[in-house]
Image (tube, helix red, strand yellow):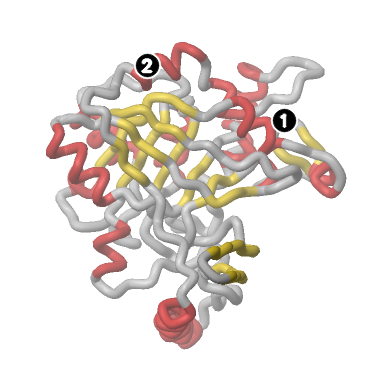
Amino acid sequence: MREIADAHEKERHVEGVQCRGSVALIDETARLRGATQVKFGRALSLEREVETRPGRLADGREAAEAEKRDWQRLAIAELPDGHGGVELDVQIGIYGRHAHGGDVIKYDAHGVHNTHLDGLAHIGADGGWHGPIPASASETDEDTMVNWAQHGIATRGVLLDIATARGVDWIPAEEPVTAADLDAALAATGVTLEPGDALIIYQGRDRYEAAGHVYPSGAAAVRRPGIGADGAQWIASKNPGLVLWDFHDARDNPAGSLEVHNLIYAIGLCLVDNCMLGPAAATLKAAGTSTGLLVAAPTAIHRSTGVLINPLLLY
């Protein structure tokens, strides 16, 4: 990761100018390249539903707790508290024939449940964020998320169906996604990647969860399905504007490091976690395409480290 960070700094950093990472690669050319991929005028949402119903949240917690106990019996670190829900306070007023609704919401902007965009101030090293930006700046006035929101994240999206390339329903924890897998999935699209493109990496998480599996948190010291270090190096070499995926890092290295998430620090990678990609993969296949215009518009929340998001793929 440090070698990748050093190479990025040498190639992309300008003395006295903060680097805004991969999003800076999304320029007019990248946006126009994305716009040309819209052939049918249709849109796909890549967001997982944000669950607020108490009963369903309880079911999710029960399943997660059962799997957590299994890990504990294996002497593996347990998950942190919380299982992806939100605190939603809905206030409804009914005044004769008139009604008014409002709500206040509190959520965790990270984790393995809700679809969210990670900001630069999510993963750092050596006391700072990518940029270079001192981590202490986030305690006062750093606005990496506002900068990205105002930049406008819209570019060509290229969907890589890793599960199909492997010939499996989902990527198993024992065999993380490699550079060879990514090359094979890219070759199947017939697309040549350009700097600033959005990589949409489908690994079969919807089928994995439909089969009854619970996807572990990155905080749990346990191997899980996802992309390994070799795949992370491949991603860095392609200079994407952002990456959207369903499974996260595989955690298959001796240190348990989250190699793709570490690219947030190394190259300023914009990551959109926990996307719902199975239906999109099937829809694009039926339409005979692997590309579209990817729009990821984060809310410009001052000092935020990440935000819930509904990425749209227009095709």
Tell me which numbered mark, 1 or 2, is placed earlier along the sequence: 2
How far from the left and from the top, in percent, is residue 26? 51, 21
Residue at 61% across / 17% down in the picture? Answer: 11
Apparent side of residue 266 relative to residue 280 in the rendered image (left or right): right
Residue at 48% across / 34% down in the picture? Answer: 242
Toward which corner of the image does residue 99 lie, by quadrant?
A: bottom right
Q: Which mark is residue 153?
A: none
The image shows residue 152, relative to residue 134, as above or below, that is above
The residue lying toward the viewer, choosing from 16 and 146, is 146
Q: Residue furthest front?
A: 96
Residue corresponding to mark 2: 33
The image shows residue 28, relative to residue 306, as above or below, that is above
Q: Secondary structure at mark 1?
A: loop
> What amino acid is labelled 1 in the image?
Gly
> What amino acid is labelled 2 in the image?
Arg
Is residue 137 something that shows in the picture?
Answer: yes
Toward which corner of the image does residue 270 lie, by quadrant?
A: top right
The residue lying toward the viewer, choosing from 109 and 204, is 109
